[in-house]
Image (tube, helix red, strand yellow):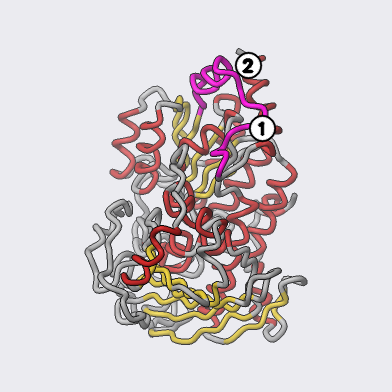
Amino acid sequence: MASRRDFIKGMGMAAAGLAFGSQNNLFAQPLTSKEWASAKSDKVKIAYIGIGNRGEQNIDEFEKTGMVEVTALCDVDLDGKQCQKVLAKYPKARRVRDFRELFEKYGNTFDAVCASVPDHIHFPIAMMALKHGKHIYVEKPITRTFQEAELLMEAARQNPNVATQVGNQGHSEANYFQFKAWKEAGIIKDVTAVTAHMNNARRWHNFDPNMTKFPDADKLPENMDWHTWLGACHYHDYSEKFHQGNWRCWYDFGMGALGDWGAHLIDTVHEFLELGLPYEITMKYAKGHNDFFFPFSSTILFRFGARGSMPPCDIIWYDGIDNLPPLPDGYGNSEYNANVPSTNQGSTPVAKLNPGKIIYSKDLIFKGGSHGSTLSIIPKEKAEAMKDKLPEIPKSPSNHYVNFLRACQGTEKTRSPFEINGVLGQVFCLGVIAQRLNTQLFFDTRAKRFTNNEFANALLTGLPPRKGWEDFYKI
């Protein structure tokens, strides 16, 4: 068993031989059928950090693969009702509240971890996984600050045998393979502008934008490890307004609608158009702007420079129920993607305009939805005229969870590794800084600093970590 596992891990070093697209993820020197069968039958020992709500959904998806053996469960609120279903399902798994104890005490029992936790704690968990040589699947957005993403990308480069995957599931679905195929065929070319929009009521709140302080303390749930929940953030008293998904609303803990949905809307645009980092980020509109939580509605302009033969490109982001983007002629109906996961804050009702994107090129306009939704050419007349020129969309060889597990086994490369998703995450961090300051910012993409606002530069790093968390920020 050991020699086979060593062989499989060694094959991960040969991942440069993987080719996406026409060769459909085959090795230049493929595994034999016997080796492939061994790789598939060798279950990945996995530990879960964050087991309620979104964590439960991820755990269910990993279970469906038939490729995992669950060895440990970690959650700061193990006694909470949201954790009980998973705890009952895996009664033999070790249980722990502090992820640091998970790695230090039980690290020899698992090969990989899945972290389904608030945005502010993504970084220390992912960094600890890399330092311990554990494959890591972490929910999006990758981090809460620009510097954290920079550090994670560098740590991943220094640990090439560790598989990393960020949880934007559409990166393993039809949207990913269609965009790649259409770009390679010259259907998607000369893109000059993209509109990305999230305008339904999902994950919005009713906090008072005129507040002058953080919420008063509520009674802490019994046995909840609040200090570990806070992680490196400076201290806040426990509040129900921070817990159970509400953390997404607060600058100190979350990344708002942009960080939550941007990874499902502009991920393929960003990767395949090689956008990198923007040179300008401008807050065009902010409803309910304040010092504590994200605006009720916002419009953000991102400007990206020319890349090789590709022209400059603008992305305009719209969020908020009452902040709909302009739609081109022939847009048609707004399709709803039924595959969007539900949340503990309720299901997603079909809105006037469901989450999606509009891609403008010099010759064509493309309309798309969220997650794995495919693009269509609009108006319909143009689509009809183009249909014989459109290449066949390759079928995905693995969903996002199988892709990660196969990368742990050394038979595929992850499609949303830190080195790819990290830069996208940094784009969101820059957008959040513009939201927080409600201003126009100019960014030097080489020096990775703002040229017109020192307050914004301070936010690239954020507040120093709390005492005891400093070592996570050292490579």
Residue farthest to the right?
447
Q: Is residue 44 magenta?
A: yes
- Closest to the observer, 424 or 291: 424
Res. 4 mark: 2
**Where, quadrant-wise, is the N terminus in this rendering?**
top right
Q: Is residue 190 magenta?
A: no
Q: Whole-Å distance between the Cαs marked 1 and 2?
A: 20 Å
Q: At 44% across and 75% down in the image, what residue appears?
A: 195
From the viewer's perspective, is 432 left or right of 208? Answer: right
Res. 28 mark: 1
From the viewer's perspective, is 101 left or right of 205? Answer: right
Q: At 58% across and 86% down in the image, what residue appears?
A: 440
Mark 1 or 2, nearer chain start: 2
Residue 7: x and y in percent read 67, 21
Residue 68: x and y in percent read 45, 27
Helix, strand or loop under label 2? helix
Q: Is residue 472 visible?
A: yes
Residue 196: x and y in percent read 43, 71
Quarter residue 62 falls in: top left
Q: Residues within 10 Å of mark 1 (few under 14, many from 20)?
A: few
Amino acid tagged 2: Arg
Segment colored magenta: 22-45
